[in-house]
Amino acid sequence: MPIVLAASVEHADVLLTLFIIVASAKLMAEIFERLRQPAVVGEILAGVLIGPSVLGWVQPTEMIGTLAEIGVIFLLFMVGLETKPKDIFKVGKRAALVGTLGVILPFVAGYLIASVWGGSFVESMFIGAALVATSVGITARVLGSMGLLERETSRIILAAAVIDDILGLIILSVVSSVGTTGIDVGALLKTAGLAILFTVIVGFLGSRVMTRLAPKVQNLQIRRPFFTIGLILCLGLSVASLYFGVAAIIGAFLAGMAMAEATERNHKMHQLTSGVTEFFVPFFLVNIGMQLNLSLFRDGSVIALAIVITVLAVITKFVGGGLGAWGMQRREMAQVGIGMVPRGEVGIVVAQIGLGLAAISEQFFASVVFMAVATTLIAPPLIKYLFAEDVDKDGVIEVVEEHEVPDEFTRIG
Amino acid sequence: MPIVLAASVEHADVLLTLFIIVASAKLMAEIFERLRQPAVVGEILAGVLIGPSVLGWVQPTEMIGTLAEIGVIFLLFMVGLETKPKDIFKVGKRAALVGTLGVILPFVAGYLIASVWGGSFVESMFIGAALVATSVGITARVLGSMGLLERETSRIILAAAVIDDILGLIILSVVSSVGTTGIDVGALLKTAGLAILFTVIVGFLGSRVMTRLAPKVQNLQIRRPFFTIGLILCLGLSVASLYFGVAAIIGAFLAGMAMAEATERNHKMHQLTSGVTEFFVPFFLVNIGMQLNLSLFRDGSVIALAIVITVLAVITKFVGGGLGAWGMQRREMAQVGIGMVPRGEVGIVVAQIGLGLAAISEQFFASVVFMAVATTLIAPPLIKYLFAEDVDKDGVIEVVEEHEVPDEFTRIG
């Protein structure tokens, strides 16, 4: 290779990595679609395949982690764009119950099984905490691709995931404090209060402020004003939420929800945002799959532990979330319960913190990562199955695809 | 900040950086649009402002460099999507002349001025090489925002930029060899031959292959099949072009051109791609501005050198490119000439290689970076001015904007 390329060799490596990730994710998505399985499962498995466990073509790096983070941020921003605040407030009480029960049961179960398995007090607390947080991105992706984000059960799941995230944060703060300095109740209350205040204030005021600002946005001179303001708001609230102690995806979701009414009929803005999202999402999904280190599972007892934790994680979340929806139809309770099951990247982050504090062992770490990936793989087919009737009922078989758009509509912008 | 956020603190930093870049770029774009100046100039100046030279809010990092590279790749992919191969071949001969003259004149001028200024032989060769390569992304952005990419002069500029890039590569290979091991004519011919073969073959066959594959793409089960295949092809050909010794943006342009006919009426695919592009472009523009280190210009002689090199870079490219279009109307010759002026990131990369080989001094390096940024800032207003009449003639004042799309069109996908 000529010297001239020296400056671009590192870019060549990065571009090659991006190419491998997108191409393999989409190839697996195509295969899974043909098998009538959810595309997300294919894309996560693509990560397992090309990651260190099997082929080793791609290693999890800071760069890919960042692209993955941007991916899940835009995924939740898109979901927010299709969620009007009043629809969320309508399901608020039920969602609070779903979120709370869906946190308590997995935490207790995780704590108990880890204790029984010989884990220390701190270790058991960490395993409990790692079982808590739902990764709503996966569920949102599956429901979105089925065109079902506007159903009541979908909204309960979304709202419960916000509450779930805040409760998870509080639990993790407690557990981390126990693992290091001991509990400071004052600091803890401050953390929790800030997180709740931020979410409630932005959730209540965001949409009103944006609806009032909409005419001004429309008068901006830059091209694609709503899309541009959307990008800025999405990134801005994601950062802000981190500083207020909430996950970045909650900020992105709130940003989308704030713009939902102002851009309701703005098809172009949705389409542009969808383009950004679709580019980044494969990195989010592949990155989850890449975290799985299969070599740790040569040990039979680790396999047993991983399976027990996974089974408990599925059952407790399903039962906890489902019970929270008590009073709805039984099928709807099951829908809510299964929608809360995927743990994805959140469980992995918790386990990494525990490992970083030397609070949990390699075996527990591997099992939690297995649980996080496994729940993410198990849930989508069940979600698809439990929601299938709704698709038929609404007559929405599939969202309109690009090649189905009639010609006369194709030259408007 | 609670311990829970430990794992996300680095993500918080990255997200904050992204937010600052996008928000400041779009703020400056809005200001420049209101002053009736090109938005690109505002976005590049945003980079100067927030970069190390002035406010120091953001430092040029590997991460931002990668996002910038993705940005210019998608920019050229979008341009390719609107360029049918036959339109390029039609202007082939003229473009070859424009590209060649537009390379020879700046190279000779750069070599001479550096020699006069006391540069060594190798140093002077490097300065000549740094003045060669046009950064067509800037011109494409300005012409695209004016809706003029389909004009003959625009196509000549695009095709000439491809030829320009290959010639620039050969010159830089020669210069780098002189700076290190001496010239190996065999290796050089092989490099040049590969680069030319790759470009010609992909240019000729790409569109035919894609047009033939289009029905198969349409039958894929994944959502948004053309957009997905477009992403994969764009990344794939960008990487491939680097391995064949051509810039990644040439591969991206060829990928877009290959899909131009197959997706001509696919409005949704263009819209989705446009979303990805618009997200990344601010990083490309801001990154150029950030490269400028104003503190090196405390020395009066560096200022003088920078200004002389910049003036020469503008005049020689304008005259060389313009002369290549001999036989067209004088205004069209001027349009072609000015369209070739921006050097942008390409000139900076050449200078960085020279600095890396210890072949050029800090002063020459600073002057070349100044030239690269300055030509990029000078050209857009002149392009806008010289093409303004065409906008009026075609009745295309501005591309249709999102908020102008009538309501009945907004709910098709």
Image (cartoon, coloured by chain):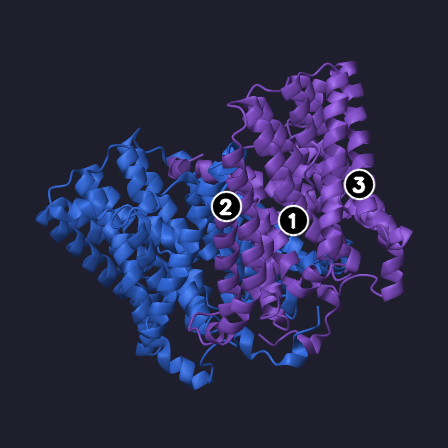
Chain colours: A blue, B purple
Which of the marked residues, 3 or 1, is nearer the chain's N terminus? Answer: 1
Q: Which mark is residue B162?
A: 1
Q: Is residue B295 left or right of residue A40?
A: right
Answer above or below: position of A395 versus A167: below
Q: Which mark is residue B389?
A: none
Q: What is the chain identity of the residue bearing mark 1?
A: B
Q: Which mark is residue B320?
A: 3
* Residue A46 x %, y %: 33, 57
The amino acid at mark 1 is Val
Q: CA distance from mark 3 to mark 1?
A: 16 Å
The amino acid at mark 3 is Gly
Q: Are marks 2 and 3 on the same chain?
A: yes
Residue under numbered circle 2: B244
Quarter occupied by residue B314: top right
Instruction: Inspect this view and state whether residue B71 appears.
Output: yes
Residue found at x 70% / y 19%: B295
Residue found at x 28% / y 61%: A317
Q: Is residue A176 left or right of residue A221?
A: left
Query: Badge 2 local density, few (<14 within 10 Å), some, or many (20+)?
Result: many
Which of the marked residues, 1 or 2, is nearer the chain's N terminus? Answer: 1
Please identify the quadrant where the C terminus of chain A is shown: bottom right
Quarter occupied by residue B143: bottom right
Q: What is the chain identity of the residue bearing mark 2?
A: B
* Residue A167 x %, y %: 37, 50
Query: Badge 3 local density, few (<14 within 10 Å), some, or many (20+)?
Result: many
Element under label 1?
A: helix
